Amino acid sequence: ETQCPYDSIQSIINGLRNSLDSDLATKLHQAVYIGCLDEVWLLVQMETRLVALDYRRFSYELFFQLALCTFGRTFAFDMSSAPIDMIAVLNATSPDLAANAIAILQAKADLLGEYFNIRIKSNGHLIGLPCLLPGHPPPSLSAIPSFLLGLATKVDWTQEKSCFLGVAVLLADLYSDFSCRTMGSSESTDDQRNQTKISKTETLIRDILFPAFKACLIPNAQLYRSACVDLSSINRLYRVFERS
């Protein structure tokens, strides 16, 4: 965890700790993975209960916290061999905002690089993004234009705490966006691509994200209310099966 000289970051991290739901943290730490129900819900066993977790919401919260708790010391996905031309990307997606957005991103490149490992060269090329969670793949290329535009238009660069929070929110959006991940080849049928996407997504959740939910996430009561659905008591299910 970051030992950060910035009071604003330490204040945010302290706020995360203070909002911890210790009961949920214990249950989550001991939870057993069962499987993905669909493109939103993950089924787990918590003690004697079956609980569905909105893995997108959990992923968002995880990456938001990781962006802050690893502030200034993340590794990077090195994209220098295939950099993203931000000028071309933003001109193609948001031509009216592109010039101003590029100017802002280049002006804030040192800050973004030093604290978040978002690496931007003076020629307007994006050459690195933070590796917030070991083993997790880089974000989809198709999600990057909206991320870059968000950095330029949604972050309050005038206030330190608001700035850091704004970048963390955008990184959380970027890394928890499952809909933009490209799965399967362009020659595959729609059904084949969809099945490949589901399979790769479930592998990512089972092997990388779910263990991180258990080990790294600081869960709070609001997350439980908004992203958990208590389905049934296992003891009750056993009684139903015994009667049938």
Image (tube, grey):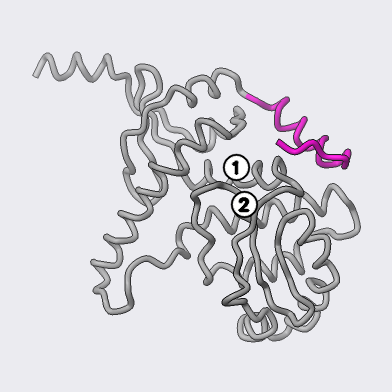
Say which residue label 2 marks: 172
Quadrant (top left, top right, bottom left, bottom right) of the N terminus: top right
Residue indicated by mark 1:
61
Relative image position of residue 230 (x, y in whole percent): 40, 27
Query: Can you say which quadrant of the picture contains the C terminus?
Result: top left
Count residues near mark 1 (Cα–Cα under 10 Å), then give few for <14, some for 14-19, many for 20+.
many
Residue 44 versus residue 49 in the image, above or below: below
147 left or right, relative to 101: left
* Residue at left offset 76%, top offset 69%: 152
Point 47% across, 65% down: residue? 180
Are circles 1 and 2 on residues that touch, CB within 8 Å?
Answer: yes
The dominant secondary structure in magenta is: helix
Q: Residue furthest front?
A: 81
Q: Amino acid at mark 1?
A: Glu
Magenta residues?
1-20
Where is residue 190 shown, x and y percent of the image?
27, 71
| Residue 170, image quadrant | bottom right
Left or right placement of residue 129 versus residue 186 in this view: right
Task: Give the percent coordinates (x, y) of residue 81.
Answer: 58, 76
Specify the label residue 34 is tagged with. none
In the structure shown, which secondary structural element does the residue marked by tag 2 occupy? helix
